[in-house]
Image (cartoon, coloured by chain):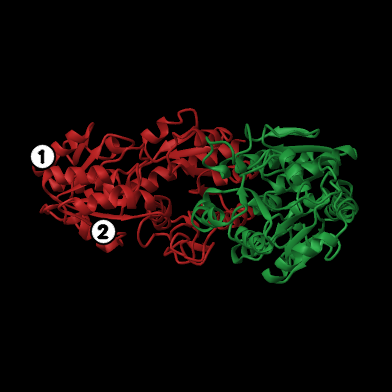
Chain colours: A green, B red
Amino acid sequence: MRIAMLAPLAESIPPPLYGGTERAVSVLTEELVSRGHEVTLFASGDSQTRAALVACCPCGLRLDPAVHDQIAYTMTQLGQAYAESSSYDLIHNHLDYFAFPFARLTATPTITTAHGRLDLPEVRRVYGAFPELPLVAISDDQRSWLPEAAWAATIPHGVDTAGYRFQPTPGDYLVFLGRISPEKRPDRAIEIARDAGMRLVIAAKVDPVDRSYYEYAIAPLIRTAPNVEFIGEVNERQKDELLGGAYAYLFPIDWPEPFGLTMIEAMATGTPVIAYRAGSAAEVVRDGVTGFVCDTLHDMIEAVPRVRSLDRHACRAHVERHFSPAAMAAGYERVYAALLRTSERV
Amino acid sequence: MRIAMLAPLAESIPPPLYGGTERAVSVLTEELVSRGHEVTLFASGDSQTRAALVACCPCGLRLDPAVHDQIAYTMTQLGQAYAESSSYDLIHNHLDYFAFPFARLTATPTITTAHGRLDLPEVRRVYGAFPELPLVAISDDQRSWLPEAAWAATIPHGVDTAGYRFQPTPGDYLVFLGRISPEKRPDRAIEIARDAGMRLVIAAKVDPVDRSYYEYAIAPLIRTAPNVEFIGEVNERQKDELLGGAYAYLFPIDWPEPFGLTMIEAMATGTPVIAYRAGSAAEVVRDGVTGFVCDTLHDMIEAVPRVRSLDRHACRAHVERHFSPAAMAAGYERVYAALLRTSERV
């Protein structure tokens, strides 16, 4: 199949540091190429891929200090991709609603993977304005917030376990990884570590929009907590070591997390996950087997000693079985095929 | 002619308070309707127009506290307008580059009025990616920053002088009007008023992005200056009174101002303009007749007493002659006609 893959330009594909969506797009793209598809990746010019790369900007926009208006790049990307839409069998959109009005104007079908939260009124409004466009959810929970949309499938993200060494022995610290923001609740992670008397490593980016939250809400907690270390963003190698060397991975979210790629990355190294029950957590973690899905902060704290009873091999096996690149690509192949059948009938 | 007019959704058309672009779109739309055109205005639902209104949101987005993502509304607006593009002879775009990729996909021609500054590298990049799309400049200075673009014309904005009472007698204060931001240089206005020993009224909005600039750079100057009053945003009636009752209007800009609608609003009431030479200033103000165009802050200060020698009738007449709704609409009618001739030939 000839597939135009529209990747976010915020990060390169794959990203050097933070970037779950871009990491998932990379895994899917490479796996589709391996399976013989002709994939054209519209992405930042510093992306690494075996697909044909169309460079839509020199490098990932978030880390480029010269970039002030990311959307100007996205509009140019969409202009280019849709102007040559007849060269593709389908367009796979990872740019959220930005592609919707183009999809409606174009004969080549577009399939959109929803990567964001769908519970906000404005999101519901813009998705509702294009109700006929087919979507892929990355968790059933994400999909449940917009049940009336044209869902083609739920396809969880995959990880390439070759990038994550299995570490059979639990370490002596907890990890919080990703992004400092109120909905990710790093404050809960600090409380859990304090109550459990265990060291916590926080590896996370701080976006400009979250700078005040970090400075006023989180930095003071880190300064006064006995055993918390903030190390900023980490690259893939550092993340592999950090996760694999941990006792447990904390995912104390307070929002409808659409997927939570770091949970499967942690489990791929053998490290169990202690997650707050929200968004996709209960779909990604097998409760009592690869971690614990908790209804309260109290339960999360009580889960810490119980992690010792879990089998780290089971965590790795769970990822290999349910979150492999092959499973992800096979899911999309089915969606692509159905999409082409439908669009031929029209 | 059947014209789809794509207005910014940030403000209603016309806007209740701040909003030069939206005010100009309103003047053009109403004048085109008067001249017998079939105009469909894609704008916020609280807009006031004699054109057919397509409501793209309930009310102007900037003043709606429920709105967090203005671009989601813009994409829905573009989706709707371009899906029905065959119902129009042409699409007149006031949404900057957002319409560019749609224009390229659509047989109905799109003409874009550039309302923003064109000197920034990222702006040049996105305009450069769509070099064939015809543009209208709102000043020759604006156009000079991107000389290689497909300029169809320069058409200055118009004002309806019925909304601005001519006041023959100069008042005893200076005015700064618009937006608090580093490029508008309210600090210069405060210096001029202080040196001239004259009262200054600042009527301006403070955008979230300029909140720190206001608090740390401007509010302290206002507190310590003897005769400066900050009154926030004003509506049309208040603006008419404020401008008409003034001795002179200060326009101490430090950026390539694309047009500067407030300069013609001030002159419409009879109030001369003291402008810094930048952007469109020398095209809008007739130096030595309707105000002074100055090369330094020193010259602006020296211009204050010289304003007394100017004829306020000349200011009003200058606006009536060069910046009328009729002149603006006639300019666009010529552009529209040429655009249709070109697109029929293709």
Q: Splitting the image into 4 quarters, where does residue B163 fall?
A: bottom left
Say which mark, if any, is on residue B306: 1
- Disc 1 sits on a residue from what chain? B
The one of A19 and A97 positioned closer to us in this rendering: A19
Q: Amino acid at mark 1?
A: Arg
Give the mark, 1 or 2, whose residue is nearer the N terminus.
2
State whether residue B287 appears in this view: no
Report if the CB atoms under discs 1 and 2 are less than 8 Å apart: no
Q: Position of residue B40 (x, y in %)?
A: 51, 58
Q: Amino acid at mark 2?
A: Lys
State whether residue B150 appears in this view: yes
Asked whether, in this view, residue A118 is left or right of residue B273, the answer is right
Asked whether, in this view, residue A71 is left or right of residue B173, the answer is right
Q: Position of residue B8 (x, y in %)?
A: 48, 54
Query: Residue at point 58% right, 60% down?
Result: A182
Q: Are marks 1 and 2 on the same chain?
A: yes
The one of B309 and B29 positioned closer to us in this rendering: B309
Q: Counting other residues with Cα less than 10 Å from the Cα at mark 2, is it few (<14), some (14-19), or many (20 or more)?
A: some
**Residue ID for mark 2:** B239
Element type at mark 2: helix
Q: Is residue B339 above or below residue B78?
A: above
Query: Residue at point 9% right, 44% down?
Result: B308
